[in-house]
Image (tube, rainbow, N blue to C red):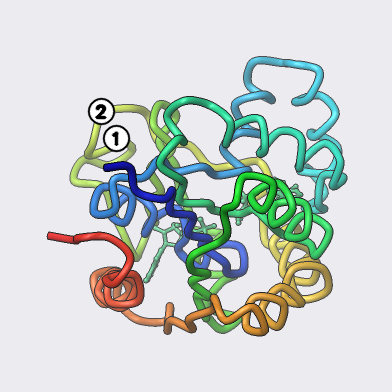
Amino acid sequence: MTTKPTYIILLGPPASGKGTQATKLREALDLPHVASGDLFRYNLKNETALGLKAKQYMDRGELVPDDVTIAMVLDRLAQPDCAGGALLDGFPRTIAQAEALDAALARQGLNIDRVLNILVPDEELIARITGRRLCRTCGEPYHMMFKKPKVSGICDLDGGELYQRADDTEETARNRLEVYWKQTSPLIAYYREAGALVDVDGNQPIAAVTQALMAAVSDLKTIE
Ligand code: ADP
Ligand code: ADP
């Protein structure tokens, strides 16, 4: 028996906890984690043409143009490991991206199953962004105050070195939040209208947010 692929979107402002929660959800749901920011950073690190194009926008905390972003993510979703669906993080971020994704899925008789809208107040987000550190190897997020690694500067999961993203400064953070409210927040109404949206309080301890997210997808797949 083949089951229909499952597509879940983690929606929420920068530093709302999408990456942190994706690590737990992807294991529970057995879905690949497709994060547009990670894809851009991979291309940046490897100095591909796509990475060079994206850099100027990322440095300013602005969105990379839709055509480039849509092509990159749809290409990723066509890879064999996404045959059963995906846990999308950071994409879509504009109505044009959401429509392109809907159209691409509809061509295969598929649709978005659930959109998890993570809510966190702006001032909390600034503190999360400026204290964020990431593993250079696996991308796992940590925080100087809220999620310290067991050994300072080292990833708990694979021993990788922790680093601070160049765009995680207070100035860029404020710009990214503005961009979120202007360009991305209209997606909340878009997906609410489609009947796919569930609001989740992201302003609680990490484990409590995980529980709320798990509850919001528990009907989609058997979760242990
Ligand atoms: P955060 O973790 O703070 O939400 P991301 O890692 O998702 O940030 O994204 C980092 C940067 O990559 C964004 O500021 C933007 O420049 C670019 N980016 C990521 N996803 C998208 C997208 N869907 N559309 C346009 N630009 C994107
Ligand atoms: P996003 O992927 O949405 O940009 P991250 O998962 O990278 O967000 O989280 C942003 C920062 O906030 C990280 O430093 C992370 O450790 C921290 N963080 C995530 N969730 C919480 C939470 N519930 N409470 C406090 N800090 C959190």
Going from N to C along the chain, the mark reached first, 2 or 1, is 1
From the viewer's perspective, is 8 left or right of 194?
left
Quick one: 29 or 144, which is closer to the camera? Answer: 29
Q: Is mark 2 within 8 Å of ligand 2?
A: no
Please give the name of the residue rendered at 25% of the width and 28% of the height, measured from the top-left corner: 159
The disc placed on residue 44 is none
Q: Are marks 2 and 1 in contact (CB under 8 Å)?
A: yes
Q: Which residue is mark 2?
A: 159
Image quadrant occupied by the C terminus: bottom left
Q: Secondary structure at mark 2?
A: loop
From the viewer's perspective, is 13 left or right of 219?
right
Q: Position of residue 92 (x, y in %)?
A: 68, 56
Q: Position of residue 38 (x, y in %)?
A: 56, 38
Instruction: Kindly identify the amino acid type of the residue bearing the numbered disc 1.
Output: Ile
Quick one: 15 or 219, which is closer to the camera? Answer: 219
User: Residue 175 falls in which quadrant of the image?
Assistant: bottom right
Residue count near mark 2 (Cα–Cα under 10 Å), binned few <14, some 14–19, many ≥20: some
The disc placed on residue 154 is 1
Instruction: Kindly identify the amino acid type of the residue bearing the numbered disc 2.
Output: Gly
Image quadrant occupied by the N terminus: top left
Please give the name of the residue rendered at 24% of the width and 54% of the height, measured from the top-left corner: 28
User: Residue 143 falls in which quadrant of the image?
Assistant: bottom left
Q: Secondary structure at mark 1?
A: loop
Q: Position of residue 177 (x, y in %)?
A: 72, 69
Please give the name of the residue rendered at 72% of the width and 75% of the height, measured from the top-left corner: 185
Q: Position of residue 156 (x, y in %)?
A: 22, 39
Quick one: 98 or 155, which is closer to the camera? Answer: 98
Numbered label tally? 2
Decide: is 222 above or below 149.
below
From the viewer's perspective, is 21 left or right of 150?
right
Residue count near mark 1 (Cα–Cα under 10 Å), binned few <14, some 14–19, many ≥20: some
